[in-house]
Image (cartoon, rainbow, N blue to C red):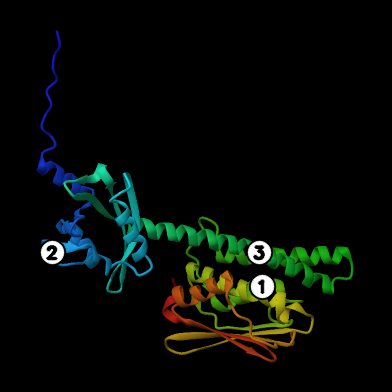
Amino acid sequence: MIVEKSVSPMWDDAHLRLAVEAACVALWSWHIDDDRFQMDERAFELWGLPWAENVSFEELATHIHPADQERVRAAFTATRSVAGSYEIDFRICLREEVRWISARGQGADVGIVKGVLFGIFLDVTGRKQAEEGSELLAGEMSHRVKNLLAIATGLTQLTGRSAKTVDDMTGELTQRLTALGRAHDLVRPLPGEQGKAALLGDLFAILLAPYDETAAFSGRIRVAVARMGVGERTATAIAMIIHELATNSVKYGALSCATGFLDVTSTSDEDHICVVWAETGGPPVTDAPVLKGYGSRLTARSVTGHLGGQLDYDWQESGLVVTVKMRQDRLAL
């Protein structure tokens, strides 16, 4: 005897609507013959548009980011003839805000019903921002590793100029690398040691100590920067800037030769502090280089973004002068 199982009517229209709302899905249908889009209220909210009975694809396209418009137009046109599932991510512009949208559906004979193509929109802005953040972090980590290798190479060459014996060079290089490790601990404290604010002047002195022939305050590097408290995030950003400037100086600037000098000073007002990095006595500067490398872009982004300031390079004949302007209320972050 066959017993038929009863099926409860759990997927009526009301339940489907609840599921759609819970998933934050926006619905749309495209009448491909006359280019009419019909969308639910969530879709209009997603696009930042007032609700209307119909909207054309071309009207929607005006809100798509200029860099994505042709790609999206080509993808939607292809859905008329290409069968199977499709998904395309693109940006839309809402005044000053940029959102990422994912359009999904099925094309050709699978998805077209009586001349109408159906699909959904999803707001994937958070996912895209996370992906961009991961890519940026990977780029930063790669750059920092390369920077550390360049720093180690520069310190080896620096030590080789003054050491008289292999033992002297070994001991001196060990001291410099140990100092670099202490500076790293200051910027990236171990678990349980977080929350201790560093001082701006000390940060410069400790990070530059490995590059000096004797010590941070008595050799060819002079640091006279205000001892203002800085938080861990700010210390990391400033350390990145110092390492970038010091690495370039060891490669091409004042720290690349025994006659070069580096003077780091600061001035401040009620809102900002300006740190001036001035190199003299190095190789003569003939032409100002074009700063297009990843490290230069990363340094500029750290200053303008996290520190809310600006970064200026002045390639004087006597040497490079860099002015780093930072907002004082950002230092404690």
Is 149 or 275 nearer to us in this picture? 149
Q: Residue, x 73% and y 76% (percent of image)?
A: 212
- Which numbered tag is attached to residue 51? 2
* Residue that badge 3 annotates: 148
Is 112 or 245 nearer to us in this picture? 112
Q: Residue, x 34% and y 56% (percent of image)?
A: 75
Where is residue 181? Give x, y as percent: 65, 63
Q: Between disc 3 and disc 1, whose residue precedes?
A: 3
Q: CA distance from mark 3 to mark 1?
A: 9 Å
Task: Residue 287: name its quadrant.
Answer: bottom right
Query: Where the C terminus falls, by quadrant?
Result: bottom left
Mark 2, mark 1: which one is toward the viewer?
Answer: 2
* Residue that badge 1 annotates: 247
Dot 1 lies on which element?
Answer: helix
Where is residue 129? Give x, y as percent: 39, 60
Dot 2 lies on which element?
Answer: loop
Where is residue 107? Give x, y as percent: 28, 47
Q: Residue, x 48% and y 68% (percent of image)?
A: 233
Task: Residue 312: name its quadrant.
Answer: bottom right
Q: Between disc 2 and disc 1, whose residue precedes?
A: 2
Specify the amino acid type for callout 2: Trp
Q: CA distance from mark 2 to mark 1?
A: 56 Å
